[in-house]
Image (tube, rainbow, N blue to C red):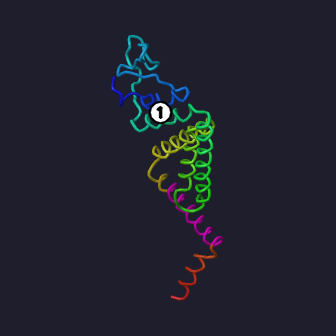
Amino acid sequence: MDPIAAPGPPEVAGRAAEKRGYAVPMERHDRAGRTDSGEPTPERGAGGLALAERRPPRWRRRVSSTLDLIRANPTGRITLKIFIAIAGALVVTVGIALIPLPGPGWLLVIAGLGIWAVEFHWARRLLAFTRRNVQSWTQWVRRQSLLVRVVLGSIGLIFVAVVLWLSLKYSLGIDVVARIMRYLATH
């Protein structure tokens, strides 16, 4: 068995956590998709053939095992939940503040939702809903003619320009349109 490819917690960290009295899931999988007990995993069909053999990247397995180790400790579980809640709230708040401005406002809101999805089930569901709707919108736009795409892009640019103009006018007191009109009238 390849210890690097095993999705469970690292041996040393797992033994150290067990010595301290924490429950650590130590189930290991070999390359054939069987646990140490020899039972096929749920991804296996009849005859041991893989239905969908996709392995997460190494960094994702390592993060997952680290989170499992943290969750094995009651204090670690509460601390992780609080940390995830605060980090997600900060990212979502900054994203919401940046939505009126051109830039990554919505992207930051979705990233904050992704942070919350690590620990909260409701955020995972909301993130899946958002992903489905963004993908369906993108596929719909791709099926449209070039004229419809240009119109949609123009509407988007006009919306961003109006939001930028209103943000500058009411937050910083800079009226870009009045300055442009004054410049055109004098030159």
- Left or right placement of residue 20 versus residue 34 in this view: right
Asked where in the image residue 102 lies, by quadrant, the reply is bottom right
Asked where in the image residue 165 lies, by quadrant, the reply is bottom right
**Residue type, mark 1 in image:** Ser
Q: Residue at x 48, y 42 (%)?
A: 139
Taking the view exactly as shown, the residue that stands out farthest to the right is: 170
Q: Which residue is mark 1?
A: 65
Residue 93 is situated, as x and y percent measured from the top left of the image, at: 62, 54
Residue nearer the viewer, 63 or 22: 22
Give the vertical position of 169 relative to 3 (above or below). Answer: below
Give the vertical position of 35 relative to 138 (above or below). Answer: above
Residue 36 is situated, as x and y percent measured from the top left of the image, at: 41, 17
Residue nearer the viewer, 160 or 10: 10
Q: Residue at x 54, y 38 (%)?
A: 132
Let me know if residue 72 is in the magenta part: no
Looking at the rendering, the stretch of residues picked out in magenta corresponds to: 151-171
* Secondary element type, mark 1: helix
